[in-house]
Amino acid sequence: MTIMSLYAQQLVRYPELGISLDFSKLPLDDAFLSSMQGRIDKAFADMKALESGAIANPDEKRMVGHYWLRNSSLAPTPELKAAIDGPLADVKAFGRDVLDGKITPPRAEQYSAALVIGIGGSALGPELVADAIPAAGLDMFFLDNTDPDGMYRVLESLPLEETLVVVISKSGGTPETRNGMLVAQDFFRKNGLEFAPQAVAVTGVGSRLDKTAEAEGWLKRFPMEDWVGGRTSVMSVVGLVPAVLQGVNVDELLEGARIVHLTVGDDGGTIRRQRALPQLLNLVGQIHQRLFFLFQQRVELFSVGGVSFLGFIHIVVHLVN
């Protein structure tokens, strides 16, 4: 087989997404694909079960439902669909009211900035969206680690009277996030401002953070479901609250995620499994596991400084899995 014919055979195009992937330099020949076919079929069957609500965490008896966030009609029960649609409508209404000036800070005419306090999945997704999509709403700032110099550098740059603070923690007890919250609260207090009227909590119902926000009278609380993992939460309230404050059209964002899911996934036969991006990337990983992990260690360096490459990895993993 000539180089060009191999290229033509193993070039995978995704016209709906505007991308193409060239696998011709990798040994994904018919013999290798045939040897992996049993694993491929099992993987698709397992994914179908997960998307249908199978228990993915036997110890905690929890489902994995981030697949449903981009298209709530996929949720296996009406109750789960409502648990997606209700908060989504609330997020959009809240964002609209903040940006339209119907919800205002106590000592300013309107909010102009948002400070997101979180770590890991509670920060990477929102940071990526803020970096990738130009702000049409509030200016976005982040406290995503416990470095004191870094935290105060961010806090001192804020228009404090016009800043809405969003504290994100699924468990409600993440130490790093709580530290950031306490530092922010103290900074507000030292500048003569109350924290609670300008604070929003995104957390599990009944968590420590949720109880704190309720007791202190925070501006708003958004519930995070236990079937949404932190690393795949960008299409949940974790990512959508900051996004809507930034001025992102979250309906278009979710529609794009839905299209990606249909384009690169398996829909029971209409889309050939040979085009499924997660499958292809997994097969590449089977061949080049050592190369992948060495690469992963190197890309972590890109997260230093403000442009988070791992944020990109975070959202891609969410969209294609």
Image: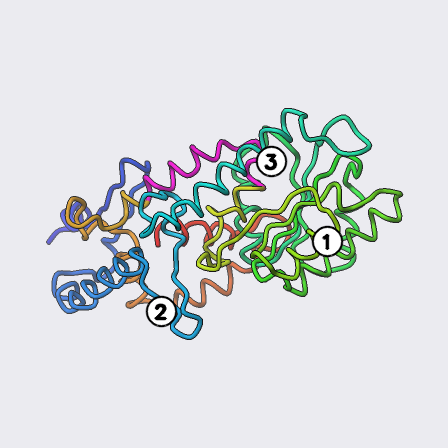
Could you tell whether 319 is left or right of 215 in the image?
Answer: left
Query: Could you classify mark 1 by the number of other residues whose Cα lies within 10 Å: few (under 14), some (14-19), or many (20 or more)?
Result: few
Query: At x 75% / y 46%, what residue is drawn?
Result: 196
Q: Amino acid at mark 1?
A: Ala
**Picture disc at residue 245:** 3
- Of badges 1 and 2, nearer the viewer stands 1
The disc, 3 or 1, on the residue closer to the chain's N-terminal end is 1
Reading the image, the residue beneath label 1 is 215
* Residue 317 figure quarter: bottom left
Label 2 sits on a secondary structure element that is helix
The disc, 1 or 2, on the residue closer to the chain's N-terminal end is 1
* Coordinates of residue 64 in the picture (x, y in percent): 39, 60
Q: Amino acid at mark 2?
A: Gln
Query: At x 25% / y 51%, what residue is drawn?
Result: 276
- Of badges 2 and 3, nearer the viewer stands 3
Could you tell whether 75 is left or right of 238 in the image?
Answer: left
Depth check, front residue: 76 or 7? 76
